Image: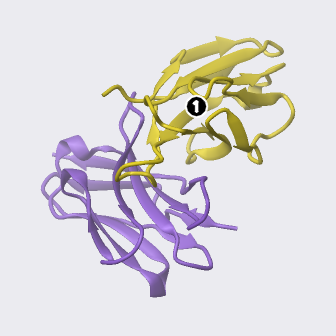
Chain colours: A yellow, B purple
Amino acid sequence: GAGVSQSPRYKVTKRGQDVALRCDPISGHVSLYWYRQALGQGPEFLTYFNYEAQQDKSGLPNDRFSAERPEGSISTLTIQRTEQRDSAMYRCASRPTSGGSTDTQYFGPGTRLTVL
Amino acid sequence: AQSVTQPDIHITVSEGASLELRCNYSYGATPYLFWYVQSPGQGLQLLLKYFSGDTLVQGIKGFEAEFKRSQSSFNLRKPSVHWSDAAEYFCAVRRFYGNKLVFGAGTILRVKS
């Protein structure tokens, strides 16, 4: 079946603008995760959802970052008043809660955000 | 707090040679351990995972990894590398009752012919 999809794949914006990054998880996956990956680093956890409930947002760096998943499927990560330090690859992952791979997170291709 | 160390930033091996990528983790109990691979333009793909049981786990594409509790290590190995294995490899750990993955900084593998 289809994997995790993310859009846009590339986003260039000017400092101070707001951006919205979208994640469409694998159909039926209850859990959804957001990670941020700076150049030369591994992904770092931002937040995760079970269904529409945000269970952990401890990794969001500040209040300019927010995420939602209103219907328990597609999720949007929003960054307000972007800064150059927000430039990174933003990755989404989803995880099933039944079947044989409930401990595996499946990652999308990521959105490369560049803030000028 | 959990942490993952991948000591080698870059590794270059000849095609057909064996490969070992190192991973050390810091965690008080036995964690869940993962290796992911990232090819250019692709998402992170799971190679293999360890939860419990046999400490030598087999994954896709001919990769295997061995969990060594005494060394807090989970090194990735492949007996014979192919040019298509050139990519960036990430080791990750998750707490038994946790959700988030903690990743190492990655190792970039180059394969020379």
Of residues A74 and A40, the one drawn nearer to the viewer in this rendering: A74
Where the C terminus of chain B falls, by quadrant?
Answer: top left
Q: Is residue B95 visible?
A: yes
Left or right: where B41 falls relative to A8: left
Question: For the residue labelled by badge 1, is the local secondary structure a helix, a strand or a loop?
Answer: strand
Q: What is the number of callouts on the image?
A: 1
**Label 1 marks which chain's residue?**
A
A114 shown above or below A107: above
- Answer with the quarter of the image where residue A69 lies: top right
The residue under the point 61% across, 52% down is B100
Left or right: where B23 falls relative to A34: left
Q: Label 1 sits on what residue type?
A: Met
Q: Which residue is mark 1?
A: A89
The residue under the point 84% across, 28% down is A64
Task: Find residue B48 and report its horizontal and vertical position in percent.
Answer: 33, 57
Taking the view exactly as shown, the residue that stands out farthest to the right is: A63
Disc 1: CA contacts within 10 A as few (<14), some (14-19) or many (>=20): many
Of residues A25 and B113, the one drawn nearer to the viewer in this rendering: A25
Task: Find residue B11 and report its horizontal and vertical position in percent.
Answer: 36, 56
- Answer with the quarter of the image where residue A26 lies: top left
B66 shown above or below A60: below
B25 shown above or below A79: below
The residue under the point 54% across, 70% down is B25
Task: Find residue B77 and report its horizontal and vertical position in percent.
Answer: 27, 65
Where the N terminus of chain B falls, by quadrant?
Answer: bottom right
Task: Find residue A13 and report its horizontal and vertical position in percent.
Answer: 70, 12
